[in-house]
Amino acid sequence: MEPLLQILLILLFAKLFGEASERLGLPSIVGEITAGLMLALTLAPENTEILKFFADLGAIFLLFTAGYREVHISDLKEASKTALIPTLSQTIVAFVFGFLLGQAFELGFIQSLFMAVAFSPTSISVVVKTLIDADYLSSRPGSMMLTSAIFDDIIGIFLLSVVTSFATYNHFPSGMQLLGISAKIIIFILLISIIGLKIYPRIFQQVHKMHTKESIFAFVIIIALFSAYLAEVFGLHAVIGAFFGGVLISEIPLAKLENVQKKVSGLSYGVFTPIFFASIGLSMELSVLFTAGKFTILVLILALASKLIGGWIGTKLIGFEWKDSLIFGVGMMPRAGVELVVIAIGKEMGIISQEMFSAIVFMVVASIIISPIVLDKAIKYREKY
Amino acid sequence: MNEDNHKHNRQQNEAKSLSQSCDSIPISEIMITDVVSVSENDTIEHVIELMAKKTHHSYPVIGNNDELKGIVDQDNMLELLFFERTPRRHHTHLMAIRALSEDVRTLMIKHPISIPYDTSLCEAADLMIKHHVDRVCVLKDDKFAGIISKADIIKKAFTLRRME
């Protein structure tokens, strides 16, 4: 199939299935992954290199937009006062469960690490609608979920940086290797921060005076690509750089003009990100879920249970009543974007097997469907007793 | 004497054409300085009351030392009031945090667009036209000095036309 036709079809399917998903009350990501799966089952496109490149751009823009629109560094300090313990607790428990599951199935150190990292982040936006409908958004567990979510992308990116750096070695790195990895990450963050804080504001002061069309929008995209490329130069994955690029321009007023934000959002959520999610579905093999049925079921159960347990323990530690802790734990169960980026990278690096990839995609989709239902039940239980 | 001549010439130039003479008109001349502002600690109820009584679209958020902290506008307020009715794609955690705002600090748009006091009218108009910005805060020595909107520019144009 010609690349142009592949991109046309994957975007069309992603949008149609995404819409169907929204109308069924589910986030569009479920429909977009299904779109890729349907495309694989019906047309099974071959020679998908160009499509894959578009999907890579999708992962880059997914995290760039997260940094650009959703992360406010100034909020982190405030949030850390209240939500640090529950956030760390649910992340650490999920990480440990993921790693132990990998070890139990005799996966290698790096494979287990990828499993652990794929277990760790949360995607709170999946349950916001449930919280609104139940009038629980402003409740203690509801507001704690929102505060905790401020750390989500940061934690996901941190773990991703570590796991992709470790992936260079197929074992736990030695002291010197760890030092090298840390130095690489720190130098990269320092360099990109200096560029972001000292140079980017000046660039935008000049760019907004340019006569060429859409110059500010173009420079926002240029910074996304530059940051992604710079990360690769430092041996880190491009998505990590894209995320930092987004965070660094998120406080520059000219880069955050409403109409520029809309265009970035349109390019990202309208085109590239749906292609990325659909390509995840395209790479999935349904049959593997059955052949590795026990593994798939355990991935799902442990991924959900670890968040529930970790969230419950963390909020109990700061004095939550047990039913509120239960609600918080359930709210932490859904996974979405970052987890899929983690496994897409793992697969691209040849570390993650088809079984592990398909099982985690299944877990992500199932967590998106299950979490709001369980949360609704937990809230009703809380109100009834 | 020279100063009077200069002023006279400038008025003549302004009368010719706004787009030709806007370079010589500083925004400080036409910006609104008597601005209704709010502080970060003001409650949402206070802002709703302000918006109900006044007709302004935006309210700058000013700190203790007159520094510009942010801006709240009618769009923010509508999003807060009707958050439950917004489409699911808007239900990000950041939007939800905004929807739960009890004071201006969490509702406001941080880092609003601003221009220095000595910017020319041409530059301000270019900014508004190119980037679809309706109003811009004006800073003098990093402190809030006023606000300029498209309406203020049109008013200026009207005055100049009447002089022709």
Image: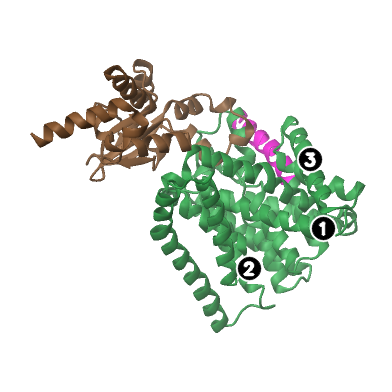
Chain colours: A green, B brown
A358 or A378, which is in the foreground? A358
Mark drawn on residue A48: 1
Q: Earlier in the sequence, mark 3 or mark 1?
A: 3
Same-subunit check for callouts 1 and 2: yes
A179 or A378, which is in the foreground? A179
Query: Which segment did they paint magenta?
Result: A366-385
Q: How far separated are the C-alphas under marks 2 and 3?
A: 34 Å
Q: Is residue A178 magenta?
A: no
Q: Earlier in the sequence, mark 2 or mark 3?
A: 3
Say which residue appears at 50% left-offset and 33% top-offset: A138
Give, as a three-letter code, the residue at label 1.
Thr
Classed neighbour count for the residue bearing mark 2: other residues with Cα under 10 Å, few (<14), some (14–19), many (≥20): many
The residue beneath circle 3 is A12
Give, as a three-letter code, the residue at label 3.
Leu
Residue A16 vertical position relative to residue A120 in the rendered view, above or below: above
Q: How far separated are the C-alphas under marks 3 and 1?
A: 16 Å
The residue beneath circle 2 is A163
Q: Nearer the viewer, mark 1 or mark 2?
A: 1
Q: Secondary structure at mark 2?
A: helix
Q: Earlier in the sequence, mark 1 or mark 2?
A: 1
Residue A110 vertical position relative to residue A130 in the rendered view, above or below: below
Say which residue appears at 67% left-offset and 55% top-offset: A57
Classed neighbour count for the residue bearing mark 1: other residues with Cα under 10 Å, few (<14), some (14–19), many (≥20): some
Give, as a three-letter code, the residue at label 2.
Val
Say which residue appears at 70% left-offset and 36% top-offset: A373
Say which residue appears at 76% left-offset and 69% top-offset: A350
Please state the horizontal and vertical placement of residue A334, each as a whole percent of the image. 66, 46
Location of residue B133 (image quadrant): top left
A248 or A139, which is in the foreground? A248
Q: Main secondary structure of the magenta part?
A: helix
